[in-house]
Amino acid sequence: QVQLVESGGGLVQAGGSLRLSCAASGRTVSIKTMGWFRQAPGKEREFVAVIFWNGGSTYYKDSVKGRFTISSDNAKNTVYLEMNSLEPEDTAVYYCAARLGSGWYATAYKYDYWGQGTQVTVSS
């Protein structure tokens, strides 16, 4: 079992920044990749970014490239999502997810464990 707890969400004006954190506990040794997803009201959950737990390779949704940065601190079992130049379209509940299998995926069902989510609201 892996437990994930997100933090760092909030209300910010357009153009502002936020940093989300996701602390993992339990069988973290089994984690291969950690992803961030988001879900806006009335929309499906969508991929934002992913990082390989050992090695650090990262991949991003096109619309966040150059604005968002995913990183990890393996000693703290924590993954971060630094979000800059935020836009109202970034408003959503943000979730972190852990995948135990090999490879990386942008589809939610490929991930094994999920956090409870943290709300990010960007005002115009």
Image (tube, grey):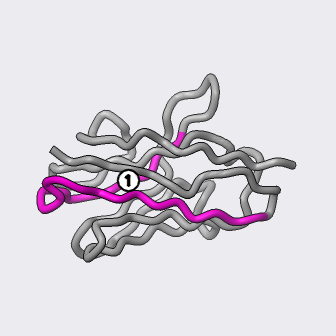
Residue 66 percent across, percent down from the top left = 62, 70
Please give the range of residues in magenta.
Answer: 16-38
| Outermost residue to the top | 42
Residue 58 percent across, percent down from the top left = 39, 67
Magenta span contains residue 2: no
Residue appearing at x 25%, y 66% in the figure:
53
Give left or right: position of 67 versus 95: right
Residue appearing at x 35%, y 59% in the figure:
23
Residue 91 percent across, percent down from the top left = 68, 43
Magenta span contains residue 26: yes
Choose between 17 and 37: the one closer to the eye.
Answer: 17
Q: Is residue 85 above or below residue 121?
A: below
| Quadrant in the picture for residue 15 | bottom right
| Outermost residue to the right | 124
Choose between 84 and 119: the one closer to the eye.
Answer: 119
Give left or right: position of 121 versus 113: right
Choose between 10 and 82: the one closer to the eye.
Answer: 10
Give left or right: position of 6 versus 14: left
Residue named by callout 1:
35
Task: Count how many numbered circles sit on residues in the image.
Answer: 1
Type of amino acid at the residue the image marks with label 1: Gly
Instruction: Please tell me whether the stretch drawn in magenta is mainly helix, strand or loop.
Output: strand
Residue appearing at x 82%, y 48% in the figure:
123
